[in-house]
Amino acid sequence: MSEELGILIGVTKPDQVTFESRRPVSIGEYVILNYGIDKVLGLVEKSSISSDALGSSIRNYEEAFESKQVAAENRRDKSYKGYVRILGYVAELKKCKAILPALPPEPGTEVYEASVKDLDAIFAPSGQQWVMIGTLLRNTGVGARVDINKVVSRHLAVLAMTGMGKSNLVSLLAKEIARISGTMVIFDYHDDYSTLDMGSNNINLLDGRINPRLLSADKLAEVIEIQENASNQMHVLRLVFTEDVKQRKGDDFWDALIHAASEVGADKLYREAAAKVVDKIDDARRKFHTILDPSMTDPLALLKNYKINIINLVELTERQANIAVSFYLEELLDDRKKATRQNKGAAKSQPRFPAPILVAIEEAHVFIPKDEDTDTKYFASKVAREGRKFGLGLVIVSQRPRGIDANILSQMGSLAVMRMIQQDDQMHISAASEALSRDLIDQLTSLNPGEAIFAGQWVNLPTFVKVDEVKERKIGGDQKAVEQWSQLAALKQQAAKESSESYIPSGYIQD
Ligand SMILES: Nc1ncnc2c1ncn2[C@@H]1O[C@H](COP(=O)(O)OP(=O)(O)OP(=O)(O)O)[C@@H](O)[C@H]1O
Ligand SMILES: [Mg+2]
């Protein structure tokens, strides 16, 4: 048994106890108590230090100064308290079961530091599905692993304020999934992942593009930016977006669409609307020529099995991105259903993806918003409900959890939460998920970048983790304005000096 840390005091409860400690204790530290039939693990959820001499009744500086000396001389002056949540018998936790002793421990029960051996067995179990993500925050000698099987089957939400390490964690998961030759699709809305370097051939980078021929008339209207309430224009588009037009490829498609819309304009009733539709098509064709591609083959065919597929959405408008993401979600779910049926010997055609896939959606509050029905929300909700059966996992990432649909959030079986100070974000998460206790949520304000609480099915226990930093990620970090400005100024100065030395008239260097 390791060193005695303290002794239980006050009223004890089966799941919560307080101890008086020899030293200050950190939030997130694990402790061992000996009672019931075996060793029991506890987590320090709150910690305090108080001093008898330096109590809150002190009225002025002189009194504080004298009391400080009294406190320094008196060994009994300081009180270090740890408030502990009882997590369960150690032996059972090693088998992924949380069983609490029925009775509370007696006050006077000794509290010990948890040993690396016990913690390793609980937080870093062996087995291929347990991948290493970092270390325990307060016990840095102990690795923190997560169960990737549970991420794929029961989904994950990664939530934190901006710049706290969400994309870093997703990159780390991607790296680990690449290492075990898994298949992942990341919708990259801010070009955060294109420089992710796996040191091998495991990445498939592609630009998010949409084949307009595969859309419904309503979705085509959205991507070419026809307003929802422009009912005449919508009518014209529905009339002209015929099966025949959909068969045309490349420029032929746009020409046929414009031609058909102009023809509808012959009818006086729709002349104005048809002219606007022709303009919209023409504009979209020019403005979005890199995004709307009527000659592309099935977009699903661009994704590769057993690779990390990163779909760059940076050039797409929000509505276009929404349509692209929903398209992929729908198709991937269909394909995985087909694969599952095939395994049961019932599929008619070959699936593209014979093995499970993990899909990550950044900016989840945009794509899966609380107060609006988007296409992505519809299919994300389907994946959240049905994905488990078909091997399609969802990771939703957001810096604005309060903006995410509560229903979908509640279907995320696991959580990674980093620093978050907004009360309404915290309350939204706590209402949607049982995995995080109120006490844990209260700790979110005290976390630093890269520090997280993991909870839910991908861990045996709620865990405070120091997530490893993915060093190869080249962007996503903050831009250093002052350094960049001074570097540029120095370059300019240097250029000016060189040009004056070579008798080039001043003013030649452009500002
Ligand atoms: N585990 C970590 N350890 C150390 N530093 C980290 C860690 N995770 C992130 N950081 C630092 O924080 C910066 C921001 O990280 P990241 O891009 O992952 O944040 P984010 O939460 O995705 O931000 P945003 O909301 O803006 O997308 C990184 O460039 C890195 O410097
Ligand atoms: Mg990010």
Image: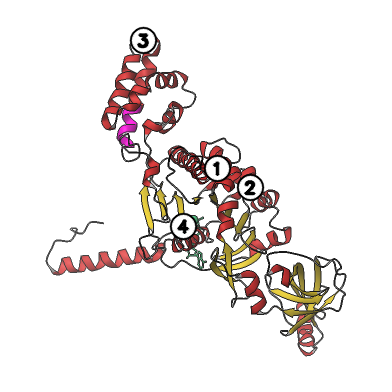
Classify mark 4 as within 8 Å of ligand 1 or not, answering yes or no.
no
Mark earlier in primary sequence (3, 1): 3
Q: Is residue 461 above or below residue 185?
A: below
- Between disc 3 and disc 1, the foreground one is 1
**Magenta highlight on residue 100:** no
Identity, as a three-letter code, of the amino acid under mark 3: Asp
Q: CA distance from mark 4 to mark 2?
A: 23 Å
Give the x, y percent position of residue 364: 54, 47
Mark identifier at residue 195: none
Give the x, y percent position of residue 129: 55, 63
At x 26%, y 56%, the residue is 511
Label 2: which secondary element: loop
Q: Residue lying furthest bottom in this view?
A: 73
Give the x, y percent position of residue 167: 49, 58
Label 2 Cα crowd, 10 Å radius (few <14 / some 14-19 / many 20+): some
Mark identifier at residue 267: 3
Q: CA distance from mark 3 to mark 1?
A: 42 Å
Q: CA distance from mark 2 to mark 3?
A: 51 Å
Q: CA distance from mark 1 to mark 4?
A: 21 Å
Say which residue label 1 marks.
380
Mark earlier in primary sequence (2, 3): 3
Label 4: which secondary element: loop
Label 1: which secondary element: helix
Say which residue label 4 marks.
182
Say which residue label 2 marks.
411
Label 3: which secondary element: loop
Q: Is residue 358 above or below residue 14?
A: above
The answer to which image quadrant residue 90 occupies is bottom right
Mark earlier in primary sequence (1, 4): 4
Identity, as a three-letter code, of the amino acid under mark 2: Gln
